């Protein structure tokens, strides 16, 4: 394809502002998907994506579009649309998708206005030198206020309110005009067709039948179907089995030239060999320099995953191996817990990532799991000068630590004016430091905070939503680390420390934390045959204590030896209840108890 006819663009927006729905309309209007095949959020192919209505993996689709010039048909263009994930955990994927485009459609819900991720995505787009077309979506809604939000959006971008295009992804209104403007406003890609091939990987997915499918955007040169390619970060080379474009399913091609977006298949079985951000070149005629931007995904949040039934351990390992094929950011290694037995310490990009992996393990691999309360990664300098990385709180070497550092994030909260006080109170309670405050309009405020990551991974977002009646939005990015006064709080059940309950907490919060968690566990752990003391301790100092009273509960006593089938039912019910329990020493602990810390603050 002549690069002059290509337009590569992405749709960026705050979550739920309608990216996937708009993408659907574009697929339909360009006749890439016909009405019969159409289903909502066509590009969200994973089950979890469809159920939760969110996009996790980016997708790229090629669509033909002919611009209308009055009654005439004008330029025949080829559009490559890249649908991006909207959640903070996947910001890195968004930024790679952006780097594959010349333009971005910035979508804003006309009933909601600008939100935290609208800003974060806009800044990312501008950093990547993309031309931005501002679009107000959902104009079909009775609550839409396109005039008001066009003002806000224009003010933010520095354009005229009339430049904001109004559409409805639901009804399709305004979408053909938007497609025309995409061709008119976005620049075609430029690259050197004669140079050695360079293509940027912006996504790679594992397919059971085909192995790893790598999505690329060609910057310079050409990639041909029979080439041997080389990954520039590792030097690994692979024979190409197939190349092509997606429209909306895979279509083989002979070559991909400058500016084209398509896929490569090499028979590689692991996405780690085809990493997002890496540069693909030709083995026989390699490029001298890789494209910028490659970075290894780094887990930010850790949690222990344990099978409830110990004999599921090999199945868990196998399932993690399989998920890893499709997720370069997932990290895991075996660990043993005194309380929970054999399991894995797993690293994730964030809480949503953790939740998704956990859900997939349970759903797709039929595993019953216990996951321990998530924690961040600490860097400790010991008295003798050695440095250690702590990914499991129970391994925190109490007493020998000179200094300890915890990760911090730069957080942006957007809130209506009325809730500024509530947001500040929440952030201060979470050890936040206010960095700045701006009025986006008379009633919308942007607050910037530095916050310890550990303070926001638990229930910060829920708290923020409930304190602002759902109006505030949040975005954050890693921002290095800070030295902090942290201690390890241990929990003892029946006098025995339970490693899976250990947590690292700020010194000023340790006492409250201990009291809360002990009280919480008392309500979560059912009465047993004997009395069970619960203690919270820092080192050998007990800071809180609760007791679960003994009970003798014979479910059959009620049945007076009568109806046998009723008896059996009761026994079965009791067994069911037991399945979700884990024996810790002599105490039966239900699964909820292991994440009780989540709702304690
Ligand atoms: P995404 O998270 O940005 O991909 O948003 P989705 O496309 O999944 O849309 C979020 C919700 O908004 C869904 O319930 C959509 O049906 C709804 N939605 C999207 N576009 C429109 C629109 O133009 N009008 C109306 N009324 N609802 C829309
Ligand atoms: Mg979506």
Image (spheres, rainbow, N blue to C red):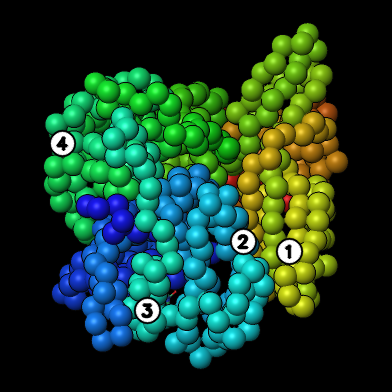
Instruction: State the SS at label 4.
Output: loop
Q: Earlier in the sequence, mark 4 or mark 3?
A: 3
Q: Which residue is mark 3?
A: 177
Q: Is residue 13 above or below residue 217?
A: below
Q: CA distance from mark 4 to mark 3?
A: 36 Å
Q: Is mark 3 within 8 Å of ligand 1?
A: no
**Residue 225, disc:** 4
Instruction: State the SS at label 2.
Output: helix
Task: Identify which residue is drawn at 49% across, 47% down.
Answer: 95
Q: Earlier in the sequence, mark 3 or mark 1?
A: 3
Q: Earlier in the sequence, mark 3 or mark 2?
A: 2
Q: CA distance from mark 4 to mark 1?
A: 49 Å
Q: Is residue 582 above or below residue 429?
A: above
- Name the outermost residue toward the bottom: 142
Q: Is there a contact, CB below 8 Å, between mark 1 and mark 2?
A: yes
Answer whether residue 563 is visible to the viewer in this image. Answer: no
**Residue 119, disc:** 2
Tell us which disc is closer to us: 2 or 4: 4
Instruction: State the SS at label 1.
Output: strand
**Residue 446, disc:** 1
Instruction: State the SS at label 3.
Output: helix
Task: Identify which residue is drawn at 27% across, 64% down.
Answer: 77
Q: Position of residue 48 (x, y in %)?
A: 36, 56
């Amino acid at each position: 394809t002549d690069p002059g006819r290509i337009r590569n663009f992405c749709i960026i927006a705050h979550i739920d502002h309608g990216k996937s729905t708009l993408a659907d309309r574009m697929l339909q209007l360009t006749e890439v998907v016909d009405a019969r095949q159409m289903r909502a959020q066509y590009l969200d192919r994973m089950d979890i994506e469809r159920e939760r209505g969110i996009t996790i993996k980016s997708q790229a689709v090629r669509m033909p579009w002919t611009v209308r010039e009055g009654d005439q048909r004008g330029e025949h263009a080829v559009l490559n649309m890249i649908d991006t994930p909207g959640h903070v955990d996947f910001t890195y994927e968004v930024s790679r998708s952006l780097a594959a485009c010349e333009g971005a459609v910035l979508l804003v819900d006309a009933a909601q206005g600008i939100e935290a991720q609208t800003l974060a995505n806009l800044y990312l787009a501008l950093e990547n030198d993309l031309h931005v077309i501002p679009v107000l979506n959902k104009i079909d809604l009775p609550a839409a206020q396109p005039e008001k939000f066009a003002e806000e959006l224009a003010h933010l971008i520095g354009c005229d309110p009339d430049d904001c295009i109004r559409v409805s992804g639901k009804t399709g209104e305004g979408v053909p005009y938007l497609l025309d403007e995409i061709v008119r406003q976005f620049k075609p890609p430029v690259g050197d067709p004669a140079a050695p091939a360079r293509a940027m990987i912006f996504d790679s997915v594992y397919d059971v039948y085909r192995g790893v499918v790598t999505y690329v955007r060609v910057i310079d040169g050409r990639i041909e179907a029979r080439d041997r390619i080389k990954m520039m970060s590792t030097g690994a080379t692979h024979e190409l089995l197939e190349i092509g474009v997606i429209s909306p399913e895979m279509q083989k091609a002979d070559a991909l030239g400058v500016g084209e977006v398509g896929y490569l298949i090499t028979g590689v079985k692991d996405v780690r060999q085809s990493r997002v951000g890496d540069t693909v070149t030709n083995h026989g005629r390699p490029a001298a320099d890789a494209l910028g931007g490659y970075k290894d995904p780094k887990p930010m949040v850790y949690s222990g995953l344990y099978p409830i039934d110990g004999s599921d351990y090999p199945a868990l390992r196998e399932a993690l191996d399989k998920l890893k094929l499709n997720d370069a950011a997932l990290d895991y290694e075996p660990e043993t817990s005194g309380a929970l037995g054999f399991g894995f310490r797993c690293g994730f990009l964030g809480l949503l990532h953790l939740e998704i992996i956990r859900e997939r393990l349970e759903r797709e691999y039929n595993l019953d799991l216990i996951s321990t309360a998530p924690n961040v990664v600490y860097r400790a300098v010991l008295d003798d000068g050695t440095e250690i990385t702590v990914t499991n709180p129970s391994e925190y070497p109490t007493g020998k630590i000179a200094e300890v550092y915890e990760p911090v994030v730069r957080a942006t909260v957007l809130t209506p004016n009325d809730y500024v006080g509530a947001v500040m109170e929440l952030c201060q309670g979470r050890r936040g430091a206010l960095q700045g405050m701006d009025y986006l309009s008379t009633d919308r405020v942007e607050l910037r905070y530095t916050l310890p990551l550990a303070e926001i991974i638990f229930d910060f977002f829920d708290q923020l939503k409930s304190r602002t009646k759902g109006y505030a939005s949040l975005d954050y990015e890693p921002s290095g680390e800070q030295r902090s006064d942290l201690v390890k709080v241990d929990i003892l059940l029946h006098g025995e420390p339970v490693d899976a309950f250990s947590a690292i907490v700020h010194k000023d919060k340790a006492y409250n934390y201990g009291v809360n968690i002990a009280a919480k566990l008392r309500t979560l752990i059912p009465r047993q045959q004997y009395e069970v003391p619960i203690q919270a301790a820092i080192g050998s100092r007990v800071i809180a204590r609760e007791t679960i009273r003994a009970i003798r509960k014979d479910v059959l006593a009620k049945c007076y030896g009568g109806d046998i089938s009723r008896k059996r039912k009761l026994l079965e019910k009791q067994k069911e209840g037991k399945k979700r329990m884990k024996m810790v020493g002599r105490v039966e602990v239900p699964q909820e108890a292991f994440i009780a810390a989540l709702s304690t603050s």
